[in-house]
Amino acid sequence: MDKKTVSRDGTSLAYRRTGQGQGPVAVLVSGAMSTGATMAPLAAALSDRCDAVVYDRRGRGGSGDTAPYAVEREVEDLAALIDAVGGEASLYGVSSGGALALRAAASGLPVRRVAAYEPPYAVYEGGERERAEYTDNLTEALAQGRRGDAVELFLRLTGLAPEMIASARQSPMWPGMESIAPTLAHDNAVMGDGLVPHDLLATITVPVLSVSGSASPAWLREAARAIAQAAPRGTYHVLEGQTHAVEPEVLAPVLADFFAA
């Protein structure tokens, strides 16, 4: 990240703008356990048609993390970024970053359009109870300083097999995951009770594109469809053969068409 801006509460935010300076501006919002660098391949894939802005969400990478945390502070972070790159932009978020992008659009920020890829809202029986149990266990693990256990809780929530989690704990990437484990609480707060926020989505006045992959679990596809149905100007799009780890080269043309419309 080669640029900095400051959020309303004084938190420093690191970001980078990629593109030709002529297309629509889109701020890309990463999900849990990731930094702005995670979005760099998508920014590169968009760069011939859009000015893509990637940033480190608070508590990650080159950005600060002023206490106390609140979801509203992350919305203010997006407001500061939008102001820094021209005063108006579209938003794209992946997973819980998609939930944050939708919240920001509903808050009245100068957002032209908003796209989200598979925010993990629970639309299956027992989903709300599972989210509440995860919240309790995550809160306890972080309060006790058990960052590794917090990461494991998150990986279990995503459905990762126990043997893969055990392997991850021995990998070189594990210390980096533990370093940003406290931000799991941020993403959990962004997700609210874990259910599709129909009332919030109904207040979004700009076009909403909700995207899922045909190879993703059925509940993620249903959540994405529900988002499009709840937003007054919502559209649902399925990317054939894609999973939750969507390929940037497949997603980019769909986003570029949407942002340029």
Image (cartoon, helix red, strand yellow):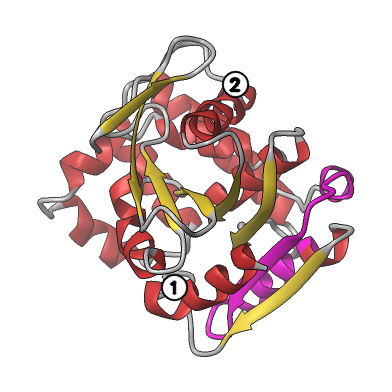
Q: Which residue does the image show at 47% across and 30% down from the upper left?
A: 84
In the rendered image, residue 205 lying in the magenta stretch gets the answer yes
Q: Which residues are magenta?
A: 198-227
Secondary structure category for the residue under label 1: loop
Relative to 221, is 209 above or below?
A: above
x and y percentages locating residue 190 in the rendered image: 61, 37
Q: Is residue 253 visible?
A: yes
Q: Is residue 118 visible?
A: no
Secondary structure category for the residue under label 2: loop
Quadrant location of residue 4?
Answer: top left
Q: Which residue does the image show at 67% across and 71% down from the upper left?
A: 219
Residue lying farthest bottom? 240
- Identity of the amino acid at label 1? Val
* Residue topped by disc 2: 70
x and y percentages locating residue 25 in the rendered image: 51, 51
In the rendered image, residue 98 lying in the magenta stretch gets the answer no
Please indicate whether residue 67 sits to the left or right of residue 107 in the image.
left
Comparing 204 with 50, the one in front is 50
Quadrant location of residue 11?
Answer: top left
* Residue topped by disc 1: 246
Structural crowding at the residue carrying mark 2, measured as other residues with C-alpha within 10 Å and reported as few (<14), some (14–19) or many (≥20): few
